[in-house]
Amino acid sequence: MKIYQIVKRLLIMILVWLVLVPSGFCGEPLTEINYRLKWLLNTSAAGDIYADRGGYFVENGLRVVVKSGGPERDPIKELELGRAHFGVASADQVIRALSKGAKVKVIAQLFQINPLQWIYRPDEITVSTPDDLKNKTIGITFGGIDENIMKAILAKSRINESQVHLYSVRYDFTPFYQGRVDLWPIYRNAQGPIIGARMEKAGETVGYFNPDAHGIHSVANSVITSDEILRDQPELVENFLSALLKGWEMAMDPDNAEKTIAMIHDADRDTPLAVIAEQLSLTRGFIQPNPDIPIGRIDVEAWKQTEQMMLDQGMIDIPVHIEKALEVR
């Protein structure tokens, strides 16, 4: 066979492959769906990125548009309006929405431990127990999940709010850098490495107050869909969720660290590779703190605790019975 004939056949094979791959390999058209994240495409979405760029959605017959989130993008509202098929939301968002009549179901819980913690300077203050919070200036986002968590800590420890100074935080860390606030809320796996490195460069020590270590178990990022989609399209839900969880399993596998870091960096160019590597290492401990617990497991008791905290603090008026909205596998 002449060389040009071999090249011709190879080109034909490549063209056929390019045509079939986007169509699900078997000529079947891919089902197009929208997936709205809670926040930006960064290390906290490592498994979402891996499932997409690793081809797991396509393998399951799906063309998934993974959309970044943010303050102006509400995944639950997009589900209600039919603009998204799946989304990511924290427990407080889901519970608030249910209290207002939203029809939403939780199909997986990505973070088994909430990465929300408070950063502080151990050279200046000691925060070994909740009792050490007395007389401290504590940053919280009024109306946010960190307010919910901090007030639950105070209540559980029988600390009156008058015994601490709650400081309203924004996106600007300046009050903390200037030492006007003793403890500042951060996501340990996302902002922690960045803020911590900046402090250490300035010769300051870094400590973290972890609510989970003191019995306050609240739920962070979880995967949601609408009642209607779960009821009417169970196969779609299964195909999406199996591909997504496979992506998270692969992203959390230390053997895939280099590949995962590269995928995240491709989506988050502003964050240096070294920082992403540290973020990824920390994220593993929040996604799967116990290897015997499967990724995506729904911690029903943590959801109930979150609902009770919100009831106690008047963030919702009546119980929503959150367990009814949890699709435990």
Image (tube, grey):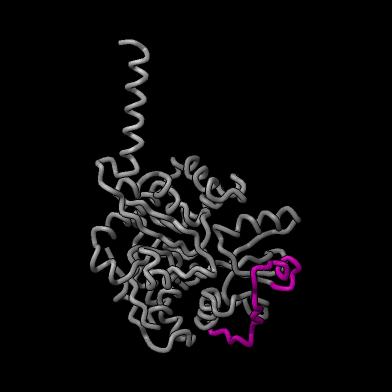
The magenta stretch spans which residues?
158-181
Q: Is residue 204 visible?
A: yes
Q: Is residue 190 above or below residue 210?
A: above
Q: Is residue 84 above or below residue 58?
A: below
**Residue drawn at (54%, 69%), measured in percent from left and top?**
71
Q: At which x and y percent is residue 198?
A: 70, 56
Q: At which x and y percent is residue 213?
A: 50, 67
Residue 190, located in which quarter of the rendered image? bottom right
Q: Is residue 223 visible?
A: no
Residue 1, located in which quarter of the rendered image? top left
Q: Quadrant of the C terminus?
A: bottom left
Relative horizontal placement of residue 312, taking residue 102 as reference (left or right): right
Give the camera-side residue of 196 and 225. Answer: 225
Q: At which x and y percent is residue 290?
A: 39, 56
Q: Is residue 257 above or below residue 120?
A: above
Relative horizontal placement of residue 201, taking residue 10 as reference (left or right): right
Task: Report how many numbered discs are placed on residues in the image.
Answer: 0
Give the camera-side residue of 25 and 113. Answer: 25
Give the camera-side residue of 60 and 265. Answer: 60
**Residue drawn at (57%, 72%), measured in percent from left and top?**
129
Q: At which x and y percent is residue 108?
A: 35, 63
Residue 318 among those drawn in magenta: no
Relative horizontal placement of residue 89, taking residue 12 as reference (left or right): right
**Residue drawn at (24%, 58%), measured in percent from left and top?**
235
Residue 179 among those drawn in magenta: yes
